[in-house]
Image (tube, coloured by chain):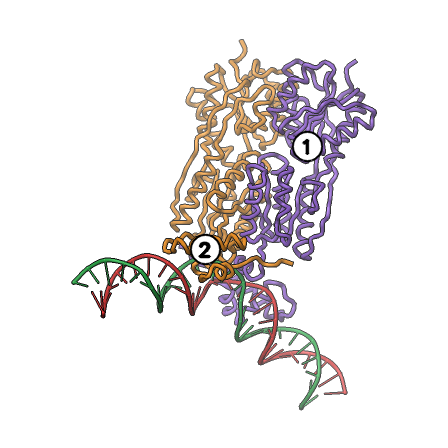
Chain colours: A orange, B purple, C red, D green
DNA sequence: GGCGTCTCTGTTAACGCTAACAAAAATTGG
DNA sequence: CCAATTTTTGTTAGCGTTAACAGAGACGCC
């Protein structure tokens, strides 16, 4: 059974000081004589002492842990975000506790948040891309530092988000610039803010060009739904350009077009969103929009930490701009 | 600043009992009168009391947190595993703290483990697919419950693993059964046990059929490296069947073959490994091997929990068998 | 040389919980 | 109905850390 490691008093005894002095050394307190500091350091090393986070959390009221609530961490976007978050947090000495959640409904989110709260996390990052998540957040204790990622832009909660609108606009404009008369859109599920933003951006670009947006075709992020939409698009001879809300949808579309003998990009151009690592190896290599997940992670963590340190809940907002990555799936329309 | 929530004594006062009775109710201790239990429950609900995990961890010596050390949580496999682990752990009332790690070298792993240890996690799951990780694990304190996933089969550490050998053998056999004279292999990085196992299985199947295995082509899991190998394979007229160590490699190979005008599956058959959700929408839909990540997660958590509860470090081993998923990328060889 | 002022170190008391023991109340048996 | 038991509850003492305060030297200044 667990033989407990040495505690602060053991270190103190070995170094011939009081435990409080050890604590001071550990926390970088200034008023410790250099010689003492060294002795304590040596004792720590000799015993292999490791401070007890639980005790510290108990007395300070917060742990060095950040709770993350996310939905589908298997998807490329959330997974990247989570990884980046963890990396950044580690640099600041924080651990990351995941609370992934099957559905983004009220109850599940609240439950996940509750779990984090009872572990006394220092702060919470909610990757909350849908409407229902916002409600759960409103009724949260006001004093827990909170940042939402890709959440509801209309709620008074600190928010970091990829500029979906700008990304979608850029993608659409890119197709328009290639000479296409209009651009069709395969969207994500419409209860995701990501989807809504991307639809918006697409529509804006079309409207700005004096074009009448065709009806968006709703998908669910999966290649499967992209395939279904692709089958319809392939049968419509007037379609020459498609912007899909993510790369997996694009993959499905690509496959459907291929099956129907519609060549990409010669007959139809396709642009995706996300720049998954495989996008460059689709057939043909996919032109897409790359959100900077690292930047999002950095921004949200920084926002969270400043809340944790200052104690104030500044209702900030930060958006990071995505970049268009041009590959081979876009060409001028035929004829 | 953080106004602390109610503590156990507050609940006790409201319910008119001692804090210890509250503790007993919380921990499902038997000897509490039904009526008292109800009163305590009511008080808990009224105050919105939430037990303080840190205090509990301090006194019991372990938290309700499981630490996971993983490398690249952006890859489909690790991400799925992590998600499944989290789901399962949540059901048992455990939180999961991720310590992802850029490199799987000695130092990084040790550092991640250290971090978990100082948070007094109840146990650690290491997704340790490479050699160097094993060494770091050897010198770990013996008393911390540990399970490795996809780790070194030759080390005396509790291990759960996908049966890579069987999966690779099935994939290779499937190609042989289709009539191919031999099967080429694009492998993962050779310091990963996953890769080694898959190479083994492939070789075994070939040997069992009395065939001489061609040299495996080493990739690095990415579509990019699959593409490079694919370019070579495309130029070799004798190649009619390829087994790749994962689906992303297969995607790269598929693209290279397509570029060279080598039709899949008519001229060359391809089989992958992992069954990423997109595999069904590759061109053509990819025949692949599906490991059961949920089963792996369940097995490892169960193993870990039994260690935590019993205190014994049973050096168990468990492998879960993957299943072949047959789609359109395999056909008999030409002529 | 006495005295305020630094700098460094030690002492004590929490933090919120569980474990171990002690006491009180309820139950049983004769 | 009283003693012996069993069930239920309360009391006390930590767990390992930080915070607040107190004490001990060292130093400079009048």
Chain of the residue under the numbered disc 2 shown in the image: A
Residue neighbourhood size for the residue with mark 1, other residues' Cα within 10 Å, grouped as few (<14), some (14–19), many (≥20) = many
The nearer-to-camera label among 1 and 2 is 2
Which quadrant of the view contains residue B312?
bottom right
- Looking at the image, is A160 positioned above or below residue B66? above
SS label for mark 2: helix
Where does the image place residue D1, in percent across and percent down from the top left? 67, 91
Residue A330 visible in the snapshot: yes
Where does the image place residue A311, in percent across and percent down from the top left? 39, 51
- Looking at the image, is B49 positioned above or below residue A139? below
Where does the image place residue B182, in percent across and percent down from the top left? 77, 21
Report the residue marked by disc 1: B195
Which quadrant of the view contains residue D8?
bottom right
Q: Is B284 left or right of A217, judged from the image as shown?
A: right
Q: Of residues A303 and B45, which is closer to you in this image?
A: A303
Say which quadrant the N terminus of chain A sits in: bottom right
Q: Which mark is residue A134?
A: none
Residue neighbourhood size for the residue with mark 2, other residues' Cα within 10 Å, grouped as few (<14), some (14–19), many (≥20) = some
SS label for mark 1: helix
Chain of the residue under the numbered disc 1 shown in the image: B
Where does the image place residue B90, in percent across and percent down from the top left? 61, 50
Count of labels shown? 2
- Looking at the image, is D13 positioned above or below residue B152? below
Q: Is B281 left or right of A202, judged from the image as shown?
A: right
Residue A184 visible in the snapshot: no
Q: Which mark is residue A39?
A: 2
- Distance CA(mark 1)–CA(mark 2): 48 Å
């Amino acid at each position: 059974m667990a033989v407990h490691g040495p505690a602060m008093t053991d270190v103190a005894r070995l170094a011939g000081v009081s435990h409080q002095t050890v604590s001071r050394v550990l926390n970088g307190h200034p008023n410790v004589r250099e010689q003492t500091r060294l002795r304590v350091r040596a004792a720590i090393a000799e015993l292999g002492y490791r401070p007890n986070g639980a005790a510290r959390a108990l007395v300070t009221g917060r742990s060095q842990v950040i709770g993350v609530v996310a939905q589908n961490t298997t998807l490329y976007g959330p997974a990247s975000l989570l990884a980046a978050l963890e990396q950044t947090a580690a640099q600041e000495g924080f651990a990351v506790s995941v609370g992934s959640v099957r559905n983004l409904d009220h109850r599940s989110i609240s439950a996940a948040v509750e779990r984090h709260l009872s572990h006394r996390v220092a702060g919470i990052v909610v990757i909350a891309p849908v409407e229902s998540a916002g409600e759960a957040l409103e009724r949260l204790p006001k004093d827990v530092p909170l940042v939402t990622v890709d959440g509801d832009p209309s709620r008074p909660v600190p928010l970091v988000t990829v500029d979906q609108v700008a990304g979608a606009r850029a993608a659409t404009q890119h197709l328009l610039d290639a000479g296409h008369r209009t651009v069709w859109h395969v969207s994500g599920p419409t209860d995701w803010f990501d989807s809504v933003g991307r639809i918006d951006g697409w529509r804006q670009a079309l409207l700005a060009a004096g074009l009448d947006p065709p009806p968006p075709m709703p998908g669910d992020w999966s290649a499967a739904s992209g395939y279904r939409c692709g089958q319809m698009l392939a049968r419509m001879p007037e379609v020459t350009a498609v912007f899909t809300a993510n790369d997996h949808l694009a993959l499905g579309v690509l496959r459907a077009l291929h099956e129907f003998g519609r060549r990409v990009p010669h007959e139809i151009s396709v642009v995706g969103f996300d720049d998954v690592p495989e996008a460059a190896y689709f057939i043909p290599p996919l032109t897409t929009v790359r959100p900077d997940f690292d930047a999002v992670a950095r921004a949200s963590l920084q926002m969270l930490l400043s809340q944790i340190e200052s104690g104030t809940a500044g209702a900030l907002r930060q958006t990071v701009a995505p970049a268009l990555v041009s590959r081979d799936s876009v060409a001028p329309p035929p004829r």
